Image (tube, grey):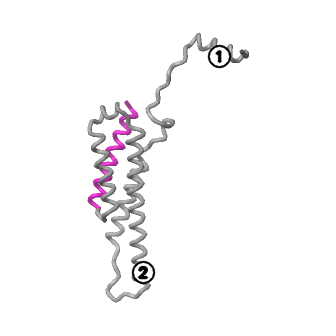
Amino acid sequence: MSLWNRALTLLDRLDQPKTAYAHCDVPCGIYDPRAAQTAVDTVIAMITKMQALQAPADGADLKTRQAYENTVSRMITTKEQHAEICKHEVTVLWGDYFKPPHVQMFPNLHEHVWNTLKLASKCKQEVNLEAAQELKQAVDQIAEWFAESKRA
């Protein structure tokens, strides 16, 4: 046994190593609800912009119609991508971060997350500002629970 190993063994006898317990699958600090919140903000922004967009008048030239359709298509794609990002981020928090003690702290966690995921799907399927605002409230609630769990 090397001198280094002997020294470490002696230190272990003097001050027994403590067992460490982790509440997550990766080092603390990796999980964060802000990505889901930012994604929801993008969904809201895209819906708001889509609702404000003026469709070309009947008889508009091809270039004008194509520009409009391109803009709408890109907004829809962005809205759907960010609704999916929101779903992914909430699912990661639910499956990897929140543990049984958190369910005791927040008894309706599972139902709330399930409903949040359903709202995110609705935001993908529809141009529905009310649903997007409900999704924001749902994600903000998860963020509050996350913050509270970190303080506990």
For the N terminus, give its image quadrant.
Answer: top right
The spot of residue 147 in percent (x, y) is: 38, 38
- The first of marks 1 and 2 along the sequence is 1
Q: Which element type, helix, strand or loop, lies under badge 1?
A: helix
Between 101 and 139, the one lying in front of the other is: 101
Residue drawn at point x = 40 percent, y = 68 percent? 75
Disc 1/disc 2 C-alpha distance (Å): 72 Å
Residue 17 located left or right of residue 110: right
The spot of residue 100 in percent (x, y) is 35, 32
Height in image: 63 above or below 132?
Answer: below
- Left or right? Give the position of 115 relative to 83: left
Residue 18 in the image, given as x and y percentages of width and height: 51, 19
Q: Name the residue under label 1.
A: 8
Q: Residues within 10 Å of mark 1 (few under 14, many from 20)?
A: few
Q: Is residue 41 above or below residue 11?
A: below
The residue sitting at 37% across, 64% down in the picture is 46
**82 or 37, which lies in front?**
82
* Residue type for callout 2: Gln
Looking at the rendering, which quadrant does residue 83 occupy?
A: bottom left
Amino acid type of the residue tagged 1 in the rendering: Leu
Q: In this picture, is 138 found above or below 66?
A: above
Q: In which quarter of the image is the C terminus?
A: top left
Image coordinates for residue 39, horizontal then vertical, percent: 40, 55
Residue 66's mark?
A: 2
The residue segment tinted magenta is 129-152
Q: Residue 10 appears in which quarter of the rendering?
A: top right
Q: Does the magenta stretch include residue 130?
A: yes
Residue 99 higher or lower than 72, as above or below = above
Tell me if residue 144 is in the magenta stretch: yes
Predominant secondary structure in magenta?
helix
